[in-house]
Amino acid sequence: MTVSTGVFCKRLLFSSVVLLVIGPVSYGLYVWKEGNFDVVAEGRVYRSRQLDQYELARYVREYGIKSILNLRGKNLGSRWYQEELMAAESLALRHYDYGISANRDVADQDLERILAILREAPKPILIHCKSGADRTSLISALYLYGIEGRSPEEAEQQFSMRYGHIPFLGNSTAAMDRAFRRYVRTHPLSRSTPQHGSLPASKAMTDDAMDGRIPRDGRRDGI
């Protein structure tokens, strides 16, 4: 029995839609299973979602990670935070907390303090938030631009849907993109900006920069 052209086209369209949906979903599940882990600067900076103690130990072994920057901030009553601290201690990692919101613009003052941590921290360092999609994208891009002197276009590749960053359709996480672009406007690259991993001398870090700060309204979103 032959199939009409109309029916064939409908089936082809349906199959294409299914592939378009299943493909990204499958990839997203794979990325999540792997911890949303990726290289920002080989041998210096890596990024991920919140990892459990076993995932963290695995990546420490594979990549020689020596420190962690937690963008969710101090959460002393949370199990994930206590487990991360214990894992960091058992793995002899330096642990830094600096809480920022994924849904609000991050002030230049906060970005400068985070850059100070990134300069000071033993390398390689792992940057993470909850999902590794938004806050982690901002700080990964900030590192490439502010410390390694990469172009804004290259640094901005850290904002990607492959990490789960979706800054459109009214999504409030577009605040991360705005914060980065504002920082680029107010801090243009100069000839003295280090290139590709040549790090400048460390800035002195305040207690706030070491411990993480709560936004001015006292809340953190997306912890």
Image (cartoon, rainbow, N blue to C red):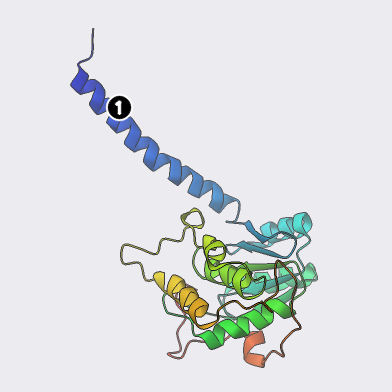
Q: Identify which amino acid the numbered label 1 is placed on.
A: Leu
Q: Position of residue 210 (x, y in %)?
A: 67, 85
Q: Tell me: residue 152, above or below residue 59.
A: below
- Residue identified by numbered label 1: 12
Q: What's the residue at 49%, 49% (across, down)? A: 28
Q: Is residue 120 left or right of residue 5?
A: right
Q: Is residue 17 left or right of residue 128?
A: left
Q: Is residue 107 left or right of residue 50?
A: left
Q: Which is more toward the observer, 59 or 178? A: 178
Q: Which is more toward the observer, 72 or 24? A: 24
Q: What's the residue at 78%, 57% (across, down)? A: 61
Which corner quadrant of the image does residue 60 belong to?
bottom right
Q: Tell me: residue 220, above or below residue 29.
A: below
Q: Position of residue 88 (x, y in %)?
A: 73, 71
Q: What's the residue at 27%, 26% (across, down)? A: 11
**In what element is the residue under mark 1?**
helix
Q: Residues within 10 Å of mark 1 (few under 14, many from 20)?
A: few
